[in-house]
Image (spheres, rainbow, N blue to C red):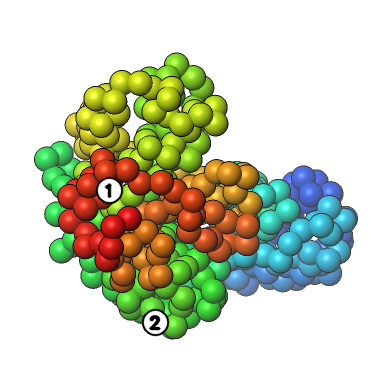
Amino acid sequence: MAVADLHTKINLQYSSRLSYVSNRLSYSRRFSLRPLPQPHNSRICCSVTSKEVQAPVTVNTEDPKKKPDCYGVFCLTYDLMAEEETKSWKKMINIAVSGAAGMISNHLLFKLASGEVFGPEQPIALKLLGSERSFQALEGVAMELEDSLFPLLREVSIGIDAYEVFQDADWALLIGAKPRGPGMERADLLDINGQIFAEQGKALNAVASRNVKVMVVGNPCNTNALICLKNAPDIPAKNFHALTRLDENRAKCQLALKAGVFYDQVSNVTIWGNHSTTQVPDFLNAKINGIPVKEVIKDTKWLEEEFTEKVQKRGGVLIKKWGRSSAASTAVSIVDAIRSLVTPTPHGDWFSSAVYTAGNPYGIAEDIVFSMPCRSKGDGDYELVKDVIFDDYLRSRIKKKLNCWLRRDV
Ligand SMILES: NC(=O)C1=CN([C@@H]2O[C@H](COP(=O)(O)OP(=O)(O)OC[C@H]3O[C@@H](n4cnc5c(N)ncnc54)[C@H](OP(=O)(O)O)[C@@H]3O)[C@@H](O)[C@H]2O)C=CC1
Ligand SMILES: O=C([O-])CC(=O)C(=O)O
């Protein structure tokens, strides 16, 4: 095919692609086309304003150092002000995701892009962090995001340098880390994974938004979150979370099963401590249909032994069955965890997140990352819940299992 024909073909592909996207968003625009440069063993990246289509430029994909900071169709830029249907949209937010080519991300990214996490009026930019080994896979992820035609997904960029990918991040979802296999404890991963979070903490400190919210998922996530925040002294320690929402969801499921109710009837479930087998799922404060769990489930032995152990060991049991660690339900719980921070907490309820303990009202040791009950006004921030009760059992479990030094009796 002659070069000129090839250029025309590429141009048409992009034109039709644009009009398809335009139809979905009711754009009405005219584009003037410029001649295209020589294609050369490359993928195409182009830039569009409301007035013109800039010549798609060729990007050599063979040299990993010459990576573009946007991917494919996401290199197109739009004049949002000109778009009728986007007038109610909020300012775009940047969401950085590490381990973006991994199992959890493969579920999560599509939920983020669909609008189910940040809402239908929140355009987003996804900034995907991978490594040399995963770069091809990362391109595959970006291609699938392109092909999904999500209206709210305005930009996708991929990269292997945290200092580039975390630039101006409003959210950093730190998933990239080795998962455990059968027979391992999460703590066994610390030697391999800890260093990742030291480096990423430094990168966030250098280039992310000063109010970036950080969700650490890679295990052992409490310790990794602490490592990360210690390496990011210019970002408020309060902004760092380690994911224990999956444990809360698992606890709700088990309580609902035992009580014979649908799980949306279960509320006020706290996971205390670490995302590990030492965690304490709190059935004392939990409620079913607004009634304390202990009044609904009278089988105290089940609550103290079977329920507690089931929640603590659920991840390991799943690995034995699946041969790999939970990914889909983890992605769902990341969605839940973020939504709990960006929407007001229902009156009287709370959610669990492992956060920095400085100034906690429970007497938990300071200067660790520990899962506790939180409430949010929906502004991305949270406060610790004060109206929780402790009995001897709960107090002793927190003391014994977590081996954490309480300043005073809780
Ligand atoms: N907190 C929680 O509730 C949960 C946490 N997890 C944890 O989340 C993390 C990610 O899990 P998942 O997405 O299933 O894992 P995957 O193996 O599917 O993906 C992990 C990604 O991490 C990156 N990575 C960095 N260092 C390593 C390494 N040494 N070995 C392997 N991969 C590495 C890789 O990406 P790249 O090459 O791009 O760097 C890889 O794509 C794990 O640590 C897992 O234990 C899982 C479930 C629940
Ligand atoms: O068990 C694992 O290693 C993965 C994980 O954290 C979980 O499923 O809770």
23 with respect to 283 (left or right): right
What is the total number of numbered labels drawn onto the structure image? Answer: 2
- Say what amino acid the circle numbered 2 marks: Pro
Task: Say which residue appears at 28% left-offset and 52% top-offset.
Answer: 274
For residue 102, the mark is: none
- Whether 262 is drawn above or below 46: the answer is above
285 with respect to 143 (left or right): left
Give the structural element (helix, strand or loop) at label 1. Answer: helix
Instruction: Inspect this view and state whether residue 235 appears.
Output: yes
Task: Say which residue appears at 54% left-offset and 74% top-offset.
Answer: 211
Tell me where residue 364 appears, x and y as whole percent: 31, 61
Q: Name the residue under label 2.
A: 233
- Say what amino acid the circle numbered 1 marks: Arg
Task: Say which residue appears at 71% left-offset and 48% top-offset.
Answer: 120
Give the structural element (helix, strand or loop) at label 2. Answer: loop
- Whether 335 is drawn above or below 30: the answer is above
For residue 395, the mark is: 1
Quick one: label 1, few (<14), some, or many (20+) residues within 10 Å? some
Q: Which of marks 1 and 2 is nearer the N terminus?
A: 2
Quadrant location of the C terminus in the rendered image:
bottom left
Observer-side mark, 1 or 2, equals: 1
Tell me where residue 16 appears, x and y as whole percent: 74, 50
Quadrant location of the N terminus in the rendered image:
bottom right
Q: Residue furthest top?
A: 260
Tell me where residue 397 appears, x and y as whole percent: 23, 45
Which quadrant holds residue 4? bottom right
